[in-house]
Amino acid sequence: MSNVSPKRVLLFGASGTIGGAVLAQLLVAGHETTCITRSGFSGEGARIVQADITDRASIAQVLAETRFDAVISCIASRSGVPDDAWAIDYAANSAILKEAQAAGVGQFVLLSAICVQKPQLAFQQAKLAFEAELQASGLTWSIIRPTAFFKSLSGQVARVAKGKPFLLFGNGELTRCKPISDADLSRFIVSALDDPAKHNRILPIGGPGPAISPKEQGEMLFGILGKEPRYRSITPRLMDLAIAALSLAGRFSKRAAAKAEYARIGRYYATESMLVWDTQRQVYDADATPEFGEDTLEAHYSNLLALRRNQP
Ligand SMILES: NC(=O)c1ccc[n+]([C@@H]2O[C@H](COP(=O)([O-])OP(=O)(O)OC[C@H]3O[C@@H](n4cnc5c(N)ncnc54)[C@H](OP(=O)(O)O)[C@@H]3O)[C@@H](O)[C@H]2O)c1
């Protein structure tokens, strides 16, 4: 990161997983960074401003006080339920974009998700609606659509370490992804500020390959532990039944409706790969999914298991 020209960057979502990693990379690269957060976040080396991203006037005020070269948005609905997704992934981003335009900001880098290429869920529709606005905005834009994050593939580390089997959907080969670490992804995002090849482009991105299945993730974990792999399979049909029952209950209860959406989200990730979708051939294409960075999921699992072993 030596040939970059320092920019004044306004970062949204710095208290989140990728936003936090992006902040660290912005500072390493020497960018003058202001973070907008909603509560008690402290990011050393950056200016922190508390503001409500759902209130356009408070975004406008921040943009009126300082001239920024670029906005990076890593905000995302914490729940993924429709109301929240439309309020954050769409409306908050849209308000930020409009205020950035009005203030003369020239560039907008958006953290999106590769799953929007086959949209079936409310949060994917909300992200796509904003992506379209950004592309039509006239600003220099980069839409970054990563594959799976390491954290999303680490939920079973503790149970496997405790001797329990690895849970699979179907035969464990229904999906594949090229996991990317927070650090590698954030380097990619920050590089979009200065790399013309990343301007005005939708950028699907994975970590170092090859693409791996859930079964191979399990093999990796058991391999590090020196144990024979043990699996328990859940049929996606079971999830369909749960979705049907919760959707029915959701007609009468908001809580059940939210649970139905979580189940739909779970089913989506259990059955759809996080790779580039080839619309002509109607298949996911691992070879067409770009790779970036060096961090491997295997090294991440080893670190997590070592941390567990060293816990008192
Ligand atoms: N998980 C994966 O494997 C994966 C893969 C590809 C793409 N993605 C996409 O990556 C994106 C970011 O992921 P992440 O894991 O970094 O997200 P995260 O950790 O959940 O962070 C979300 C950020 O948005 C902010 N935010 C949410 N609701 C807000 C509200 N009402 N008001 C103010 N701020 C709000 C959060 O602030 P607070 O801290 O104040 O809540 C936080 O800074 C998502 O769009 C996701 O779809 C994820």
Image (tube, rainbow, N blue to C red):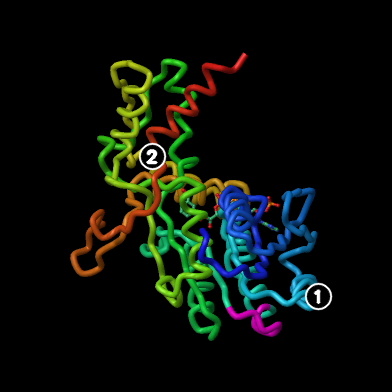
Q: Amino acid at mark 1?
A: Glu
Q: Is 114 located above or below residue 21 in the figure?
A: below
Quadrant holding the C terminus: top right
Left or right of residue 15: residue 115: left
Left or right of residue 105: residue 181: left
Q: Position of residue 45 (x, y in %)?
A: 72, 53
Please check the rendered image and state whether residue 143 is part of the magenta-colored stretch, yes or no: no
Q: How many marks?
A: 2
The residue segment tinted magenta is 100-106
Q: Amino acid at mark 2?
A: Thr
Left or right of residue 13: residue 304: left
Q: Is residue 289 visible?
A: yes
Q: Which mark is residue 255?
A: none
Residue at image position (47%, 68%) is: 143
Q: CA distance from mark 2 to mark 1?
A: 42 Å
Q: Position of residue 84 (x, y in %)?
A: 62, 59
Residue with the mark numbered 2: 296
Secondary element at image label 1? helix
Residue at image position (52%, 16%) is: 309
Image quarter of residue 12: bottom right
Please check the rendered image and state whether residue 101 is part of the magenta-colored stretch, yes or no: yes
Do the numbered discs 2 and 1 sit on residues whose CB atoms are within 8 Å?
A: no
Residue with the mark numbered 1: 65
